Amino acid sequence: MKTHSRHWTKSSYPQSGGKPQELLNNQFVKDCDAAIALFWTRFGTPTDEYASGSEEEIEIMLESGKQVFMYFSDKSIPPTQINSEQYAKVQSFKEKYRDRGIYSTYDTDDSFKEQFFTHLSQYFLSLQKIEELALQNSPSLIIKGIHDDQLDKVAHVRKFDLSNIQNSDAMMEQIKFIFGEISKNSLGTYNRSETPYAISFYKPVEIDENTKEFIISMAKHLDIKIEDNFFNLGNLCRNTMSVPSIMGGGSTFDGSKVELKKYNDIIKLEKQIRALLGWLPIERTFEKLTCIKLALSNEGTTFDEDIDIELEVKTEMLLRHDKFEILPEGSLEYVGDDYISLDDLFSIKASAKYMDYESSIQTPSAPSYVPTPNSGLFYNSRDYEEEYLDMLDTIFDYQFYEDNDVAIVKLHVDYIRQHTSVAFPTPIFLTGALSDIPYRIKSKHNPSIVTGILKLVADS
């Protein structure tokens, strides 16, 4: 701990515009962290408010909660050298602080040195201990990389991976498999004489011509041969008098298990093909991009909140989300059993090692669900491209600022518990140029700004 001593004889300078003691107080007394006061027989010159300048300085320090080392000398002195009035003031001042226990006495210079060294050591060792305890009971924030759902001290630059949502190769294999399942069921055409029910209420089930053409087109693309009976459903029929339940209960079909399976497989095949055709533009647009995934980690022993993160990324290596290629309209509408949103594509989902970003928000300003552009009633009146970019702005919860050749990427985190990590909202997308990323973290419960450098490594 580095210290500097100050005394009015060496630390003051000529100044006008105020009373001498007031000028001294403003020049250096109020800025001191601790004071040492030694009294023997003289008390000093009175000020406007106190019996001496020394008393005023002591009171300023004590009122500010600062340390005062106060000593009174009992060394002998010839009576002729004692100013009785000054000495009486010293004794009166000493009596004033007797019950407060904030002074010591000494009778030799060696005694003073011994006491002062002991008191000084005790005080600053106590301060050091307090600082150590404060350090032990404080948040400790650091930026880490996310790699295969694990946290790492470096950030891995890799291709943007969409396999957790869909994979075109797997979808294609599933389509081929369903083609094969349907081809196994070589059913004939509907035979009316084999239907033992009231014929007027039952109609044969047939596959729509548009569906047939759609499936045949995909079969040609995959070089899959379709037999003439591919769409035959045997004697599968529909009861035109039955009313399906609102909740989906009850069946309007009548037929064998084989017939029903073939019909369901054909419907499933159509859905899978449409899902693939919807997914391919998404995959082709984003699979070529590279990115890093990051998380804020608190390795300290207490929580932190109101956290501002700043990353310094070279402008040439940052690919902002508003520069993404815009997906063809309709490609997001249906790629599987459910609608898919941009949030599904980009948000970093929670794992056993870290929370998702949404979990750190204390007072969400909007629902977490991010709809697909132009997929709902409220979006039909808006321009598709405008909707698309607005949705990206909502998901990529960053602010960007340009500073010469550096882009400042800012992120706010409301709250993080001790021994916890929170993922960034989305990956940060990069171009081919790579450079380590300096960062700063400011937070409510950390008096200093945390700085660090995030090292980037390129995955092979």
Image (tube, rainbow, N blue to C red):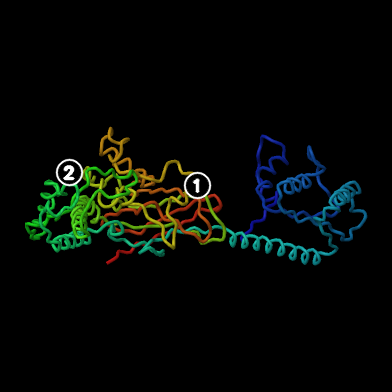
Residue 260 in picture, x, y percent from top left: 21, 56
According to the picture, the residue beneath numbered tag 1 turns out to be 362
Find residue 138 and report its image quarter.
bottom right
Question: Dot 2, how many residues are within 10 Å of its Cα: few (below 14), some (14-19), or many (20+)?
Answer: few
Specify the amino acid type for callout 1: Gln
Query: Residue 87 appears at what percent x and percent y?
Result: 88, 50
Residue 264 x, y percent position in the rendering: 21, 55
Q: In front here: 63 or 270?
A: 270
**Could you tell me residue 365's position as x and y percent?**
45, 41
Relative to 353, is 217 above or below?
Answer: above
Looking at the rendered structure, the kind of residue marked 2 is Ser
Q: Is 304 left or right of 311, judged from the image as shown?
A: right
Q: Which residue is mark 2?
A: 200
SS under mark 1: loop
Q: Nearer the viewer, residue 445 or 285?
A: 285
Which numbered circle lies on residue 123?
A: none
The vertical placement of 381 against 460, above or below, is above
